[in-house]
Image: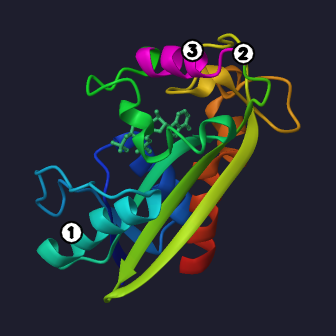
Amino acid sequence: MKTKLCFATNNTHKLEEIQAILGDSFELLSLKDVGCTEELPETGNTLEANSLQKAQYLYDHYQVNCFADDSGLEVHALGGEPGVDSAHYAGKQRSHADNNALLLKNLQDKTDRKAQFRAVITLIQDGIVNQFEGVVTGQIVEDYKGTGGFGYDPLFIPDGYDKTFAEMDLVEKTKISHRGRSFEKLVAFLG
Ligand code: ITT
């Protein structure tokens, strides 16, 4: 029998991607599949707390083995900001364009451009909690480059490359990205 696992996301693209990696022995369920239509709570101060909160909510309310992810951009010269606030850095309109503009403004005149994307997955199986972290380090550029991806991608060049995430296709990005790396660890754990 296939092992059922719910992924706490409404993003069908993320769901398909991870189903392809997990293969046939797991049946991935969406939030809709388990009847969860409300917004999951996400009020923590860290990526770890938020992904745990989402997974715990789902496990407690829907009695289903599950995992949740949370991710963000951590900028060295800004003391790790925007971090857990990445999606709404410039305000509750959650605009990627506004967030990017604010980031460039806050880094004006800063020579230290070091940054990292970080993702944390929390898996809960039969009440047992495990977390998996993925990190990619790089630099924030001075001006937008590329049109692919989303969020801060046009401003982030991963170490060892001379192009931004927005200049890569999804396959290339996922091989080195925070999300890709965290999912790799999850898949290895699930066997
Ligand atoms: P869901 O929570 O609905 O999955 P989200 O856009 O909030 O969608 P995340 O929580 O995974 O996605 O990421 C929070 C923010 O961090 C996201 O809105 C972006 O601003 C930034 N971010 C995360 N991963 C990114 C990536 O691969 N490229 C660019 N920006 C990213």
| Residue at 48% over, 79% down | 130
In magenta segment, residue 103: yes
Amino acid type of the residue that numbered disc 3 sits on in the rendered structure: Lys
In magenta segment, residue 6: no
On screen, residue 124 versus residue 117, left or right, reads: left
Q: Quadrant of residue 90?
A: top left
On screen, residue 115 versus residue 132, left or right, reads: right
Q: Which mark is residue 105?
A: 3
Amino acid type of the residue that numbered disc 1 sits on in the rendered structure: Tyr
Pinpoint residue 191: horizontal percent, then vertical percent: 59, 80
| Residue at 68% over, 10% down | 143
Marks 2/3: CA–CA distance = 9 Å
Task: Name the foreground residue: 158 vs 66.
Answer: 158
Compared to residue 73, the image places residue 121 above or below, namely below
Ligand 1 shows up in the quarter that is: top left
Q: Which mark is residue 57?
A: 1
- Look at the numbered discs 3 and 1 and tell me whether their residues touch, using CB distance below 8 Å: no
Foreground mark, 2 or 3? 2
Q: Earlier in the sequence, mark 2 or mark 1?
A: 1
Range shown magenta = 98-109
Pointer 2: what residue? 109
Compared to residue 103, the image places residue 120 above or below, namely below
